[in-house]
Image (tube, rainbow, N blue to C red):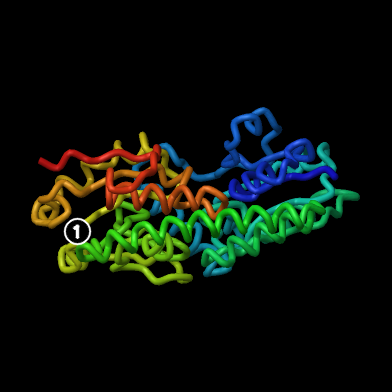
Amino acid sequence: MRVVSLLASATEIIAELDCLDQLVGRSHECDYPTQVRQLPLVSHAVIDTQTSSEQIDAQVKQHAQARNNNALNALSIYTIDTYQLQLLQPDIIFTQTQCEVCAVSEQDVAIALEQTIGLSPRIVSLAPYRLQDVWEDVFRVGRALEKLPQAQELVQRYQQRLQQLQEQTTVLAIQQNKPRVLILEWLDPLMGAGNWTPELITYAGGENIYGENGERSPWLTWEQLAELNPDFLLLAPCGFSLERTLQDIPILTKHPHWSALKAVRNGHVYAIDGNYYLNRSGPRLVESAEIIAHILWGERLSITTTGWQPIVTS
């Protein structure tokens, strides 16, 4: 089969199923494992992602408003290279229906295919909101690639790792109060973390205090953040690398409420590579839970993680 993936997490699942030899094209966000970067790009973002967080947010909201108003010139924030798609002649295209901001959507693919001639691949759409949905997506990819038994084995291993992690953190949480944790998925304006992230915090032995499991990530004000006053504040802007996140720290530190936060006073503020971990609905969500646990419990856990660093708050 000839496969095109327009979703980074789908690409990672394909790799876990040892099917990279079938992958012939990828989205601009598919960058792991590193060998996929040699494949032809089939999509790119039409907004400027190199500008400030505030301006990125404004661009996204402008496109969303245009779509809501059914404007004739309303565009997705992504575009698909229909010429490249025609050249690749895929049998299967993996995309998603979960978020039109996070990745190329099923609607984007449908519009692109209308512009091609003689191309009618199978469209497989992933729709993750909770961890169970992510596991179902692994099955969905496995079924499409005729690798369902292997997909079932993968999910079993993921669940076992998370269960083992929770057993360790439960013991630690009994010895002291669970740390109250708030994860920010955007910094300007502030956005909490929903979808599968509250579950990851639970597995890590923390208490999630903002954002609902299985629900879209919610906005919050600085006043709400100050009132919630988390023990640990984790920064993982959607789509941002660790380096890019660190560039935005001054947005937070210059705010009047910043220095009064308990997490800031106690030196419990951390940046995480959200693009590689928390934001991707794929295999590395297991590592994401381990990262959170490592941050919360330190050397009391016998695990080693990368992709994060503490923020100096004093």
Q: Quadrant of the N terminus?
A: top right
Q: Is residue 230 left or right of residue 135?
A: left
At 58% across and 61% down in the image, what residue appears?
Answer: 134
Q: Is residue 99 left or right of residue 249?
A: right
Q: Is residue 275 left or right of residue 293?
A: right
Total labels: the figure holds 1
As rendered, which of 179 and 112 lies closer to the eye?
179
Q: Position of residue 259 (x, y in %)?
A: 10, 51
As rendered, which of 216 and 80 lies closer to the eye?
216
As rendered, which of 107 and 294 lies closer to the eye?
294
Q: Quadrant of residue 169?
A: bottom left
Q: Position of residue 199 (x, y in %)?
A: 43, 65
At 57% across and 52% down in the image, what residue appears?
Answer: 282
At 70% across and 55% down in the image, what residue appears?
Answer: 151
Give the answer, above or below, for where 227 lies relative to 124: below
Under circle 1, the secondary element is loop
Amino acid on which disc 1 is placed: Asp
As rendered, which of 101 and 281 lies closer to the eye?
281
Residue neighbourhood size for the residue with mark 1, other residues' Cα within 10 Å, grouped as few (<14), some (14–19), many (≥20): many
Q: Is residue 217 left or right of residue 160?
A: left
At 63% across and 58% down in the image, what residue appears?
Answer: 96
Q: Position of residue 304 (x, y in %)?
A: 39, 39
Q: Quadrant of the C terminus?
A: top left
Give the answer, above or below, for where 180 lies relative to 115: below
Q: Position of residue 86 (x, y in %)?
A: 82, 42
Which residue is identified by label 1?
A: 231
